[in-house]
Amino acid sequence: MLKKFSWFSAGLFLITALLLTTCKKENNDLGLEIQPPGDKLNVHSIDTTAVIAYSQIVDSVKTDETSVSLLGSMVDPVFGRSTASFYTQFRLSESAYDFGITPYPDSLVLSLKYDGFYGDSTAVMTVKVYELAGQIQLDSLYYSNQSVAVKETLLGQKTFTPDFSSNVIIGVDTLDPHLRIHLGSLTSTLASKLLTAPADSMADNKSFLNYFYGLYVTAEPANSGGSIIYLDLLSSVSEMTLYYHNGTDDSLKFEYLINSNCARFGNFTHDYSLGDPAFKAQVIDKDTTLGKSICYVQALGGVKTFVRFPYIKNYYANGNIAVNEARLFLSCYEPDPGLDVASTLVLVKRKAEGGYSITDDQLEGEGYFGGYYDKNNHGYWFRITNTIQELMRSADPDYGLEVYVSGGAVNAQRVLLSGKSPQLPIAPEDRMKLIITYTTLN
């Protein structure tokens, strides 16, 4: 059974519906009933502005110390295969801890609290855990295309179907749903290393982080279907627990914590060779003309869509005008997508030297700016009045706009968008369009 879910989607859809209800009456209609008949002739609305759009690969996305960590692999029939992994440090739950006389490891368990998923929740996945061979630093920036050296020994492996609804009973404790990976069933290498740590390495966290760098958790690439699971590493449930006994006591344990002082980051990889031919032709082979029909946006540092209005300055060249409102509509291309479409998109300005900056319209607030998925219209609205007014009047070159999935480092969502001239059976009105309402000035 294919399930499509993320914990925050329902809330975002509700906010979107409320926003669209309050904004249903077009701004260009306001006050027209009290205007003199002659003044009404100066108000115009047009939705045939030329639009150039096409999709490109995203270089990377910043993934260090995010609120959610991603793990898993899935094959999308359009985008191909995406795999998410992460690196994390651990800290001592107690400094200068003494394991006692002749300690011996019983087991070592890594626990990771579930926080949602994207894809097929019933798909079986296999995850693997390795020890880091290189350090990661809390004060450093890390991106989705970066990696850190790991040791060759496989510490743990688990093949499972995620269970997002059932609590886990550990002794007398009832814990939230989470993934448990035994790191001592294949080898006791790490358990023994932790149990025999020198006293000076256990003195404080700074010393411990120089002794044990952390773990790398990854997923085997899926061959079909699959899912990306979301994990809350900052939950008290997420930790590594060493169970042991010594010469005097049994059933002992020591906990290694993941908290906000731990460096951690995600790594995302994409195999677009498994994607749809039309997608590969546009995004990989860079046939930008295909953007006239369809465009693509993908999280995980995947794909963005470039948008530009090549003749927008001509409006101002023909006489002074004031833009009452400009809204960009991005219509979803798939009538009935097999995966949830992205809940929120973000629109930014491309900079001359590369990179991007936020638009002036975004500073007006999310309720004004938009970007939420509109279920009724199966698409997204952006109000970009200030941006269009500036493009019309400025002598500076227009470097265009870029569309991303919002929160692309903490979710695995994607969406297909109709271009300016989508092919049948897409209806002409369900196209990418800029709707400008403006007043000509005498």
Image: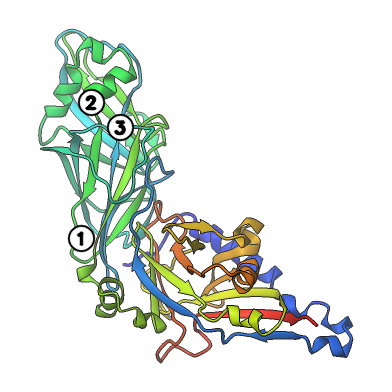
Nearer the observer, 143 or 396:
396
Badge 1 or badge 2: first in the primary sequence: 2
Q: Report the label total.
A: 3
126 to the left or right of 111 = left
Percent position of residue 131, x then y: 19, 34
- The residue to which callout 3 is attached is 89
Rendered residue at 37%/72% (across/down): 55
- The residue to which callout 1 is attached is 222
Q: Amino acid at mark 2?
A: Phe
Rendered residue at 68%/74% (across/down): 325
Image-quadrant location for residue 376? bottom right
- Mark 1–mark 2 CB contact (< 8 Å): no
Q: Secondary structure at mark 2?
A: loop
Q: Is residue 197 something that shows in the picture? A: yes
Q: Which label sits in the foreground, 1 or 2?
A: 2
Q: Secondary structure at mark 1?
A: loop
Q: On screen, 235 above or below 83?
A: above
Percent position of residue 331, x then y: 49, 78
Q: Which mark is residue 428?
A: none
Report the Cα–Cα distance between label 1 and label 2. Answer: 30 Å
433 to the left or right of 383 = left
Badge 1 or badge 3: first in the primary sequence: 3
Percent position of residue 7, x then y: 46, 54
| Pointer 1 local density, CA inside 10 Å: few below 14, some 14–19, many at least 20 | some
Q: Amino acid at mark 3?
A: Gln
Report the Cα–Cα distance between label 1 and label 3. Answer: 27 Å
Q: Quadrant location of the C terminus?
A: bottom right
Q: Amino acid at mark 1?
A: Ala
Badge 3 or badge 2: first in the primary sequence: 3
Q: Is residue 344 something that shows in the picture? A: no
- The residue to which callout 2 is attached is 212
371 to the left or right of 30 = left
